């Protein structure tokens, strides 16, 4: 579903320029990027933007500074900065962004700034995937449905991240109709030795095909995990085995074959 770009070989990555900073949060941040790879074709399905501190500190370092007073502004600013970073990195494919549903009160209004940024940067909204972690699921289902339907109406794609990590609520698939599911790494760990994990992944592959949902397995770290997932029909993968996140760079992937 994301715009496909050729997978380049090698250990180097394309450098990019730091985007202009004009935010009054009291702290600054950058982005690292990690590719999601189509393992059948060797092409990059999308690059996920991961928030980082100015010295490469992990996402937790930044997110620990988010509170009710700055959540909305941070969410808006992070989207714009991620898009700027992708542009300066000369990335022309799909961009996967994490977002905070708790920061969106009126999605039509909140998305207007994102749409303005897309127009200014000449980025087609259909290149953008908004990832929503299961850890952020709320109880106001009407509000959630409104957010997702608004995103999709404006040609953005919606992904459920960390799926199955907390609740494994399959009702989410029928209630919200995501474009993409990213399976939590919990189901990857030791999958080569655990038939129950293999059964779950195989069932999810078939279910997503039936529902026309793109299925991504994240957290792939070993060759054994990769080989089992391939045998189970998983095409889209993300993880250290293929590429580690690179700060302010677009990393290339190394296929394990």
Image (spheres, rainbow, N blue to C red):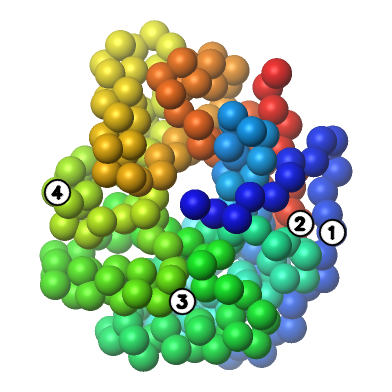
In the image, 127: left or right of 7? left
Q: Earlier in the sequence, mark 3 or mark 4?
A: 3
Residue 70: image quadrant is: bottom left
Closest to the observer, 32 or 1: 1
Q: Return the residue at label 2.
A: 249
Q: Gap in Å between the C-alphas at discs 2 and 3? A: 21 Å
Q: Closer to the camera: disc 1 or disc 4?
A: 4
In the image, 228: left or right of 101? right
Please provide percent x and percent y for residue 77: 54, 81
Q: Return the residue at label 3.
A: 75
Q: Gap in Å between the C-alphas at discs 3 and 1? A: 25 Å
Residue plotted at (28% across, 71% down): 149
Q: Return the residue at label 1.
A: 15
Identify whether 257 is placed above or below 3: above
Closest to the observer, 123 or 11: 123
Contact, mark 1 vs mark 2 (Cβ under 8 Å): yes
What is the secondary structure assignment of the residue under circle 3? helix
Q: Return the residue at label 4.
A: 171
What is the secondary structure assignment of the residue under circle 4? helix
Residue 186: image quadrant is: top left
């Amino acid at each position: 579903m994301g715009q496909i770009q050729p997978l380049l070989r090698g250990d180097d990555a394309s450098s990019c320029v730091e985007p202009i900073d004009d935010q009054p949060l009291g702290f600054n941040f950058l982005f690292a990027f990690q590719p999601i790879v189509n393992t059948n074709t060797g092409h990059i399905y999308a690059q996920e933007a991961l928030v980082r501190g100015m010295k490469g500190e992990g996402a937790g370092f930044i997110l620990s500074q988010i509170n009710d007073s700055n959540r909305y502004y941070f969410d808006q600013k992070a989207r714009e900065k991620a898009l700027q970073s992708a542009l300066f990195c000369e990335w022309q494919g799909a961009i996967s962004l994490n977002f905070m549903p708790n920061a969106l009160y009126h999605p039509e209004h909140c998305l207007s700034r994102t749409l303005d940024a897309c127009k200014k940067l000449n980025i087609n909204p259909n290149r953008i995937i908004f990832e929503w972690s299961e850890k952020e699921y709320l109880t106001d289902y009407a509000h959630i449905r409104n957010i997702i339907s608004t995103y999709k109406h404006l040609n953005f794609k919606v992904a459920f991240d960390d799926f199955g990590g907390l609740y494994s609520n399959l009702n989410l698939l029928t209630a919200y109709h995501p474009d993409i599911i990213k399976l939590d790494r919990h189901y990857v760990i030791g999958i080569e030795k655990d038939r129950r994990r293999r059964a779950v992944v195989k069932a999810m592959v078939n279910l997503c095909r039936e529902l026309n949902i793109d299925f991504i397995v994240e957290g792939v770290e070993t060759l054994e995990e990769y080989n089992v997932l391939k045998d189970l029909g998983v095409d889209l993968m993300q993880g250290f085995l293929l590429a580690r996140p690179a700060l302010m760079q677009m990393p290339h992937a190394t296929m394990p074959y």
